[in-house]
Image: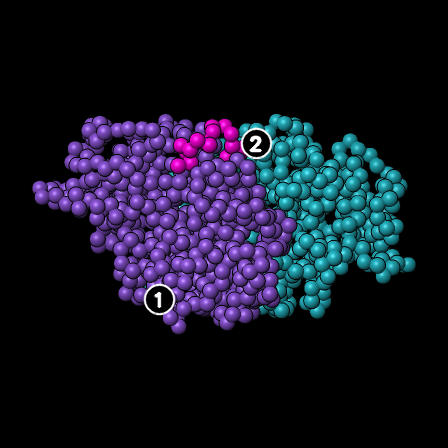
Chain colours: A cyan, B purple
Amino acid sequence: MSSDINFEPLTPVSFLRRSGRVHADRVAVIDEGRETTYAQLLERCERLAGGLNGLGVAPGDRVAVLLHNTQAMVEAHFGVPMAGAVLVSLNTRLSATEFAYILEHSGARILIHDVCFTSVVAEALAHLGSAAPRTVAAGGREADDEYEQLIASAPCHSVSITDERGMLALNYTSGTTGKPKGVMYHHRGAYLQSLAMALHTGLTSESRYLWTLPMFHCNGWCFPWAVTAVGGTHVCQRRVDPGEIWGALYTLGVTHMNAAPTVVSMLAWHKDAVPGKLQRKVRIGTGGAPPTPVLLARMGELGLDMMHLYGLTETFGPSLLCDWHPDWNGLPLDEQARLKARQGVGNVISETARVVDEHGQDVPADGRSMGEIALRGNNLMLGYYRDVEATRRACPDGWFRTGDVGVMYPDGYLELRDRSKDVIISGGENIASVEVEQAIATHPAVLESAVVAAPDEKWGEVPVAYVTLRDGETLSADVLAEHLRKRIARYKVPKYFVFGELPKTATGKIQKFALRSRARGQ
Amino acid sequence: MSSDINFEPLTPVSFLRRSGRVHADRVAVIDEGRETTYAQLLERCERLAGGLNGLGVAPGDRVAVLLHNTQAMVEAHFGVPMAGAVLVSLNTRLSATEFAYILEHSGARILIHDVCFTSVVAEALAHLGSAAPRTVAAGGREADDEYEQLIASAPCHSVSITDERGMLALNYTSGTTGKPKGVMYHHRGAYLQSLAMALHTGLTSESRYLWTLPMFHCNGWCFPWAVTAVGGTHVCQRRVDPGEIWGALYTLGVTHMNAAPTVVSMLAWHKDAVPGKLQRKVRIGTGGAPPTPVLLARMGELGLDMMHLYGLTETFGPSLLCDWHPDWNGLPLDEQARLKARQGVGNVISETARVVDEHGQDVPADGRSMGEIALRGNNLMLGYYRDVEATRRACPDGWFRTGDVGVMYPDGYLELRDRSKDVIISGGENIASVEVEQAIATHPAVLESAVVAAPDEKWGEVPVAYVTLRDGETLSADVLAEHLRKRIARYKVPKYFVFGELPKTATGKIQKFALRSRARGQ
């Protein structure tokens, strides 16, 4: 009997139910200048659920979306689970073949897509034949917008979530190697991760969150739910254009955003970046490449407060963050950069992260001994969809193996050394490519770089560096090599330097696999 | 297998495990000038658990504490559950007989008490005979402090919490009528409520929380856990003395506190309250009596930001809060006070609160129809300890009945009208005593008041007001009655006014039952 009053399954859908009521008249979403209140958003999501229900979507069914960072994408994060269904967000940069694979593997019944993707969707569906999902196009002209018609004509509908560990979303990893794997998210994990994100980044009902990070990427690190939980405003941003982002920061009162390191660099050195012009501090979460002292100083003068995060699709986004100690603010900037380069510690709802050897034993917490980063806790996936074997391999002993190599410092902060596959073994010595990249980043002419292994007769492997310079800068390989020899061991200095653009994934991750195959050809 | 990586029972104990590592060197507790870091706090709590274990405390056993707001009291909130035991916090203002009742009813094996309570404890234990718990005195002289000796001599110990819905604490209601009832708290509820409190009040690792609200009261609304979750600092305050509180606000960088309305009033009009002197804004959570426009204005100029909360022992403290809309800041002050007087809406982890009639149906959300406030959700008790019948009565249909009467506004915000038993029925008309109290509070000479029913030949009942004036103010019953007749219906104007101090509970709640019995005698 007591269970009647004191147990309610945890689900992020509850955040919209609350904000639709509590923050009814506040702006929930701004998309291309159009404002939608929380009361309207709640109603639209309930109608979306009703519409999906009318199209035959039953609890447990998968509903795929191929959408930019639009209002429809925010709505899918609530409307789909309100129909009891599982949200499958597709990476907008994939090919028709890849879309077809994911649609088939997930068994999606419905695909909601931006009208701009109509032709690639048709191509993908042609692969599927009778297994093709029914499509609903969004963002068309007002008169024939299928998505708007679905919402306008449907009744409100919202199922009760009864199992907090039931499936909420299915996110396919970008698959730099092999076929994409479907990472199963559960309601409980998304709920708790959302609260953690809101708490650590200081979201409130006065926050305005700019959507630069794609929502298809780990469900936008759970921010569609986190921002809604506090009644903040989602500011949609369809393209990652630094000029447009600066426009939004200056004119729309943005307080928070998340972005790939590349985007952060582009912002920092963009012509519209004017120190002192921002009305209020903007907190930027970023993960992947650690910030350099130069970048940190630049961010500070621009009023951008950077937070270093780490996570994977399997962990609902940021499982770790470099939880900043206020007294570190008094340190010299390069010392701050060194501390901020660390991925840090589990967030408030994560379990303590570990760095383990090949036997699953913790390596010494000395900041030098490398091991694999292992995670567990309520913000870990249920497993890989329809792939028990891959799930088993990823979690051999109750701890999820990230595939990332790191070290543990005596203070319990962890630092990524490398993706396992990115370790370069040269003459029997391990070289962490990230260490070389960080050394390269200390040169003021460098915008970003990636270091990978190239095969070598004598040493087995040698490091090769791909380097992008800042606009208007020039730099020779010799000068850069000399710069590095002052900073890292000689064997770690790349044998070749290639200057130019770096290949990237949709989320701005550098595609090292592409560089490795280039390096093999050299 | 997937459960290995993605399910961890929710328990607030995890917050200290994390902060002991992440915020190891930060100050966790300041008590009488002595600072303790998070690493030290974690170790002390683990030793406390080890010490309790050594005294024979087994998982599920109850450990009672009779402590002021001291470091030992913070430690009990972690050390006791680390021993797998249930924390029973005793209200320090109770009598020996009442202590004996609770100790016997809870079956506590151990009682940790401040040394200042030694004689009342001896008296209580005399009632219990062989069932008396073993005592551990804290806060004695260094050489013979039993509590410190227990900690110093014990090994570290910490059990795993395996059932998140298991019992964490047992809090006896103050029992204005009948015997105290033991409210059973669970780990999951305390964990979620802590996150909600941290998020809504904006706690961060830079926060300094002043302990004016007694920790024995609903486990300090879960703030022992919430402040620890973010790595903030607990500033212990043993006595509720406005001069001492102002001293702490001015010199210790306090950012947050919770306090009864009486304490807030005392602070606002204290001689040390100097507008503009506070270095940073202090957020004060308060519940019970709604703030008047005069008080709100005064708080504003003092740099005190008030948050109106509502909850009961049964709800882990604040289940509702007056979630403030930024655009309300532009309204005239009396309008703001009217909005802030509302208890508001469920916090981010609460279910939507309801106002129901005697059949359990929602009353119209018109701001006028009265009903009983009904709650449910993860921040509700497991039930009353060893009292199935009382639990059943309190939750007749899956919704916990608070015993409080309120109205629901069209915007979903709820306002307390009265404790059920405080409704005055005069000539067949219901009078909500709080409405009369609010009208009395508009007179500038009034500090606070309480209105109760007195029996009356003609009308059945009539309202009687007990009024405390501000220092140095004078006011006659006639002048006050005239003031009220301009503001409320004539039948609501009290028939008698009694000027003087009001009787209060330990937590600053006005003891209306005492006033009612006085009123009956008049």
**Mark 1, residue position:** B127
**Mark 2, residue position:** A280
x and y percentages locating residue A85 in the rendered image: 45, 56
Say the numbered circle drawn on residue A173: none
x and y percentages locating residue B63 in the rendered image: 45, 64
Q: Is residue B280 magenta?
A: yes
* Residue A522 versus residue A131 in the image, above or below: above
Give the residue type that dot 1 points to: His
Q: Looking at this view, is B23 or B217 the one in front?
A: B217
Give the residue type that dot 2 points to: Arg
Q: What element carries label 1?
A: helix
The residue shown at (62%, 64%) is A399
x and y percentages locating residue A377 in the rendered image: 56, 60
Q: Quadrant of residue A414?
A: bottom right
The residue shown at (68%, 45%) is A340
Relative to A299, is B510 on the left or the right? left
Quarter of the image with the N terminus of chain B in it = bottom right
- What segment is highlighted magenta in the picture? B266-281
The residue shown at (31%, 62%) is B391
